[in-house]
């Protein structure tokens, strides 16, 4: 049983219609009772899950704000504890003052994610489900959201638990032999580990390989648009956004700083960065800018290189193509809306320099943009669209756990193949089982929990 009562502002800080102060813990109702004055003769304690009209007052009975208060009796609540939510007017000052009162009457300020951590510690959610809540809040596309909701429903956890149980079954067979440690592994138990173990490994491998795709839906793809000055980079950003976000002029060097936007390509969030044009320069300040673009290229998942069809390839374009040789990249020849005789680039010129897909576009007229989106989607997903019911691993942490579990399982299988002593094989099986428990949280350490919940926002 957790002793203290926590409180926080659970809505974003800023101006809004309402803002909510949330209190959770065994003294929640007691604390609320000290500062809440209902509008009629109602005791909110008798009004579970109903909104009650009234005022919050300070220690001198001065009214701070007009509010609606909702008392929710545990354990049917988010944290499984008693919860009180105070719906104030959504401004920074009323919310801070109400929170101050709540803290003055005995609540402690909640740490980031602490409400959700309590939901986990009190058994309402497992760890993967708790993590999905932050994914829901941060989701950038419908598809990202539906993946996170599926994880909240427990689909990932269910699959993990099934695998854990199969490993446990193997472990039981091995441990039946453990009373005779000097013996080698009994033949049929060894057989079972090899056969069943290989099947489980296959399943783990499948989940691991889904992780890259899952991550894409969850975090998006960081994409950078690069090219010489005036080739149409900002025009391309605008064409993809279908609005005029970046300033476009015929003056070289229009874009001075990095501009980042998110676009949705069939459910995949593309975080797209427009850059200052790259050109050879002796100017010190500009050199720093170019250096920064280089660093951004290194970090990007995908590079879109824009070339100017009218101007033709110059030495700077060549240098840029050299720069992205080892990156996932698409080469876009822009400005193809002009008369054919004005076009001075051939695809073969590009291919002599890099082997990357080449697309012809006009950022100004929107020609080839649909095709470009399709190409990006296929590049990122390998062309396969996954059904919405598929369990995708979307979290890097989960992927690492699955890989660790698979390694131990592989060791166990190797051990069984070599007829190693029973207890050695048992250790590997146990570690494979334990690793998986870090996904659902059944074997997670305090440290791991802290690290995960630290990442949450305050008030969640
Ligand atoms: N004809 C034609 N002109 C284009 C096209 N795309 C861009 N332009 C023109 O090219 C010029 C430069 O466009 P920007 O989008 O500002 O180019 P940029 O690469 O962002 O330039 P900097 O930020 O200065 O490096 C503008 O005059 C655009 O109207 C296109 O598809 N066709
Ligand atoms: Mg620009």
Image (cartoon, rainbow, N blue to C red):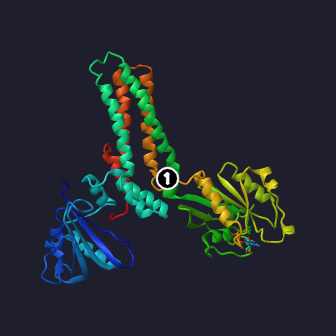
Within the image, what quadrant is residue 195 found in?
top left
Q: Residue furthest right?
A: 341
Looking at this view, is 303 or 430 the one in front? 430
Does residue 204 appear in the picture of this structure?
Answer: yes
Say if residue 276 shows up in the picture: no
Q: Residue at x 49, y 40 (%)?
A: 205
> Residue 300: which quarter of the image?
bottom right
Question: What residue is drawn where x is 43% and y is 36%?
Answer: 200
Check the image and report above or below for 81 versus 415: below
Q: Which residue is mark 1?
A: 214
Question: Foreground: 18 or 450?
Answer: 18
Q: How many marks?
A: 1
Q: Residue at x 27, y 56 (%)?
A: 118
> Quick check: 140 above or below 412?
below
Q: Is residue 338 above or below residue 271?
A: below
At x 61%, y 66%, the residue is 258
Label 1 crowding class (10 Å Cα cut-off): few <14, some 14-19, many 20+? many
Image spot of residue 407 (x, y percent): 45, 34
Location of residue 441 in the rendering, given as x and y in whole percent from the top left corner: 33, 47
Left/right of residue 352 with respect to residue 120 in the rendered view: right
Residue at the far top in the pictured view = 182
Q: Quadrant of the C terminus?
A: bottom left
Residue 329 appears left or right of 49 = right
């Amino acid at each position: 049983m957790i002793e203290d009562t926590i409180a926080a502002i659970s809505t974003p800080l800023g101006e809004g219609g309402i803002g909510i102060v949330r209190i959770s813990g065994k003294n929640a109702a007691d604390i609320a009772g000290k500062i809440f004055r209902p509008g009629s003769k109602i005791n909110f304690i008798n009004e579970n899950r109903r909104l009650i009209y009234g005022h919050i007052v300070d220690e001198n009975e001065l009214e701070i704000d007009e509010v609606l208060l909702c008392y929710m009796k545990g354990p049917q609540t988010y944290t499984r504890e008693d919860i009180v939510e105070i719906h104030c007017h959504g401004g920074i000052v009323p919310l801070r003052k109400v929170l101050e009162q709540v803290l003055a009457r005995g609540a402690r300020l909640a740490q980031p994610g602490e409400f959700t951590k309590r939901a986990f510690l009190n058994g309402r959610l497992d760890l993967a489900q708790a993590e999905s809540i932050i994914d829901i809040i941060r989701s950038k596309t419908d598809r990202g959201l539906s993946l996170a909701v599926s994880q909240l429903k427990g689909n990932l956890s269910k699959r993990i638990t099934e695998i854990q149980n199969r490993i446990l079954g193997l472990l039981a067979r091995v441990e039946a032999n453990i009373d005779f440690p000097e013996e080698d592994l009994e033949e049929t138990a060894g057989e079972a580990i090899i056969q069943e173990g290989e099947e489980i490994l296959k399943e783990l491998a499948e989940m691991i390989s889904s992780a890259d795709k899952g991550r894409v839906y969850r975090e998006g793809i960081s994409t950078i648009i690069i090219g010489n000055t005036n080739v149409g980079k900002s025009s391309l950003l605008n064409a993809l956004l279908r609005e005029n976000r970046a300033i476009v002029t015929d003056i070289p060097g229009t874009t001075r700083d990095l501009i980042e936007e998110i676009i949705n390509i069939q459910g995949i969030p593309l975080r797209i960065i427009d850059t200052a044009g790259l050109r050879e320069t002796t100017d010190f300040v500009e050199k720093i800018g170019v250096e920064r673009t280089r660093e951004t290229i290194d970090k990007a998942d995908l590079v879109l290189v824009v070339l100017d069809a009218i101007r033709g390839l110059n030495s700077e374009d060549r240098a840029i193509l050299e720069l992205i040789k080892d990156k996932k990249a698409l080469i876009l020849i822009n400005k193809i809306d002009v008369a054919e005789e004005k076009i001075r680039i051939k695809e073969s010129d590009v291919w002599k320099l890099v082997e990357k897909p080449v697309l012809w576009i006009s950022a100004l007229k929107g020609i080839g943009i649909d095709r470009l989106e399709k190409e990006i989607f296929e590049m990122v997903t390998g062309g396969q669209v996954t059904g919405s019911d598929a369990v995708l691993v979307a979290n890097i942490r989960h992927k690492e756990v699955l890989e660790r579990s698979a390694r131990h399982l592989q060791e166990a299988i190797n051990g069984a193949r070599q007829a190693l002593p029973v207890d050695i094989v048992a250790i590997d099986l146990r570690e494979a089982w334990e690793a998986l428990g870090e996904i659902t949280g059944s074997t997670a350490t305090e440290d791991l929990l802290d690290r995960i919940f630290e990442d949450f926002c305050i008030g969640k």
